[in-house]
Image: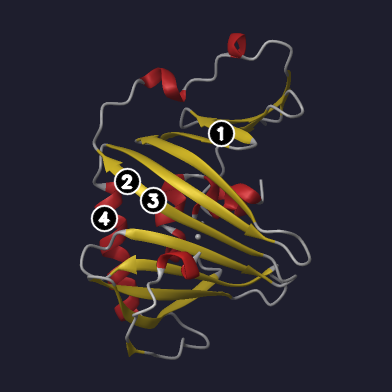
Amino acid sequence: MRILLLFSLFAITVCVLPAQTKTKVTTPPKETSDPATKLVLDKMKAKYEGYKTLEADFSLTLEMPQQPKEIQKGKLLQKGAKYRVDFNQQTVISDGKSVWVVLPKNKEVQVNNVPGPNDDDGILSPQALFRIYLRKDFIYAITNEFAQGKRVVQEIEFKPTDKYSEYSKLRLTLDKKTQDFIELKVFSKDGSRYTLVMNTISPNKALADASFVFNKASYPGYHVEDLRE
């Protein structure tokens, strides 16, 4: 589940062009979030929640201490509260009420209830990704703004309010003009880094309802562990 956190979840060095020019740097507040930054995030949330459907290709870069960098590529489909994520090692399917995590390597399927908005695993859902700033366990502010090619991007840093959090910070990068989600980088206290990059985003495409239904017949020989309460 931790890997899937990174819907919010990232590599800045890949996306930022050498000719970047910094124009603004501010210090994140220590105890409260920046109201001006909230307005930016409100616009992003309204934009993505305004889409009837969403299809996106993404890449997830995992950097672990003393291990080679790993890059996984995947596809996200979303239709209202329903979503599906397919990438290297697993598939996640949700009909809006339950979540099926398919693990081909183990020939196993784990079934859970859809996490609530305040649950840690709630970030697994695409909707939760765009609402992360509404969680009370983060404070945030715009910490950087610079030119990236022909666009201007903003970096927003999220700091956990819990000093025992396994993460030191999250860094969200947006297009300033369009509020497009570019990437999210998660910094773990153990030195690990996770970078989720949205490579292409296609809104309002026709998506079949069958994409969001788990069909057990499609996974013969898989053990299904139902953890729903």
Query: What element does badge 2 sit on?
Result: strand
Q: Quadrant of residue 192?
A: bottom right
The residue mark sitting in front, 4 or 3, is 3
| Disc 1/disc 3 C-alpha distance (Å) | 19 Å
User: Which mark lies nearer to you, 1 or 3?
Assistant: 3
Horizontal side of residue 42 vs 211, given as left or right: left
**Residue 201 — which label?**
2
Residue 149 lies, with reference to residue 74, above or below; the image says below
Q: Are marks 4 and 3 in contact (CB under 8 Å)?
A: no
Res 119 seen here:
no
Q: CA distance from mark 2 to mark 4?
A: 16 Å
Residue type marked 4: Ala
Is 188 positioned to the left or the right of 133 in the image? Answer: right
* Residue 199 numbered tag: 3
Mark toward the start of the polypeptide (1 vs 2): 1
Asked whether disc 1 touches disc 2, contact meaning CB atoms under 8 Å apart, the reply is: no
Q: Secondary structure at mark 4?
A: helix
Residue 92: give its label: 1
Under mark 1, the amino acid is: Val
Q: Residue at x 29, y 50 (%)?
A: 48
Alpha carbon separation for disc pair 4 and 3? 20 Å
Q: Residue at x 48, y 62 (%)?
A: 184
In 3D space, how far apart are the residues under numbered discs 2 and 3 (Cα atoms)?
7 Å
Q: Nearer the viewer, mark 1 or mark 2?
A: 2
Q: Quadrant of the C terminus?
A: top right
Mark positioned earlier in the residue sequence (4 or 3): 4
197 or 127, nearer to the observer: 197
Percent from the top left, x then y, of residue 53?
A: 30, 36
